[in-house]
Amino acid sequence: MAVAPETSKPVFWWLVVIGAMVCAMILVGGATRLTDSGLSITEWKPVTGAIPPLSLEAWQEEFDLYRASPEYQLQNRGMSLAEFEFIYWWEWGHRFLGRMIGLVFFVPLVVFWIRNQIPTRMKPRLVGLLALGGLQGFVGWWMVASGLVDRVDVSQYRLAAHLSLAFVILGATLWLALEARNGPATRGQGQLTKWALAFWGLIFVQIALGAFVAGLDAGRIFNTWPLMDGRLIPEGYLGGMSWFQAAFESRPAVQLHHRWTGYLVAIAALFLMFALRRTGLPTLRKSAHGLVMLVGLQVVLGIVTLMLAAPLWLSLMHQGGAIALFLFAGLTTWRARIAD
């Protein structure tokens, strides 16, 4: 039996495709949330749900199921069938893309495994990544189910869990792709690696906070900058809650925390830039400049999105910026580990 290779370009490009599909999934999911489309499909049918309604009768059946939901009863009563079709297609597209990712991941995995093209060290981690994808499907339905009883939207906690897991999957895919292309990052784990990893983690936290902003529609209040309607701490910050509860359930508090964590990201990016530049290594110097540019762009996008009350196109650009920054921070962490 042939010995498995240390690196594999076919596996690398396969994982690049998977990563690109995950990025598309995150953006379509964001559009689904921002268009209030996520509760349009009220049943979870992992197999038969891949087929959309193909007749007027089938459309009417789906519409009748939706009309029994709290969102329709309390928010969208009187919606036409054509309006329902618009939100249905967003949610169906999101779920269909998830199914396609599972298929594009599983089939090549089996083929590469049989052909012994996967580095041995990567096999258990690829199986783990497949399991995370399956878990993400369950978490997605768990999120949707929270909005089908006694409320008109999904739980912001479950939305944050769903988005956070998507970025865990994206980060793992990036790391495995780099390993398939270059081999394992076996150098030491010095201070530079720890700083880069901490920065990557901070980006992840900021993205999770952004999910709470989206889940509570907190980007559509206090649409001024740099102060929040003339105040550093906005009115209604606690809203009668404890600080811990307000951090996740108060719209003013959620927006404030997302703002200030963004400033922290900017400061951390400058600190990491100087640390990377001091190494004198060309790849790390490029990473240093790239990080600062991406963070600056993301801060500007965030401010403009907020001041315009989060229109769909700008919100998706802001989310796309978060994806780009997360991926580049992961690449920088890889490069730092190689250099340490």
Image (cartoon, rainbow, N blue to C red):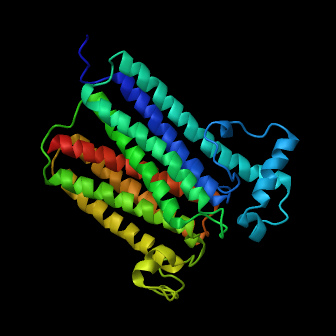
Residue name at image x 29 percent, y 63 percent: 268
Q: Which of 272 and 154 is in front in this view?
A: 154
- As drawn, 28 above or below 231: above
Residue 99 lies in quadrant = top right
Residue name at image x 37 percent, y 45 percent: 171
Q: Is residue 239 toward the left or the right of residue 176 in the image?
A: right
Can residue 44 be seen in the rendering of this structure? Answer: yes
Can residue 304 be seen in the rendering of this structure? Answer: no
Q: Which of 196 and 133 is in front in this view?
A: 133
Q: Where is residue 170 in the image (x, y as percent from the top left)?
A: 41, 44
Q: Where is residue 192 in the image (x, y as percent from the top left)?
A: 17, 52
Count of picture labels: 0
Q: Which of 72 and 262 is in front in this view?
A: 72
Q: Where is residue 221 in the image (x, y as percent from the top left)?
A: 59, 77
Q: Which of 60 and 337 is in front in this view?
A: 60
Residue 281 lies in quadrant = top left
Q: Is residue 166 toward the left or the right of residue 95 in the image?
A: left
Q: Is residue 312 toward the left or the right of residue 131 in the image?
A: right
Residue name at image x 41 percent, y 45 percent: 169
- As drawn, 264 above or below 221: above
- Quadrant where the C terminus sits is top left
Q: Position of residue 148 (x, y in %)?
A: 66, 62
Query: In the orientation shown, which residue stands out farthest toward the top?
Result: 1
- Quadrant where the N terminus sits is top left
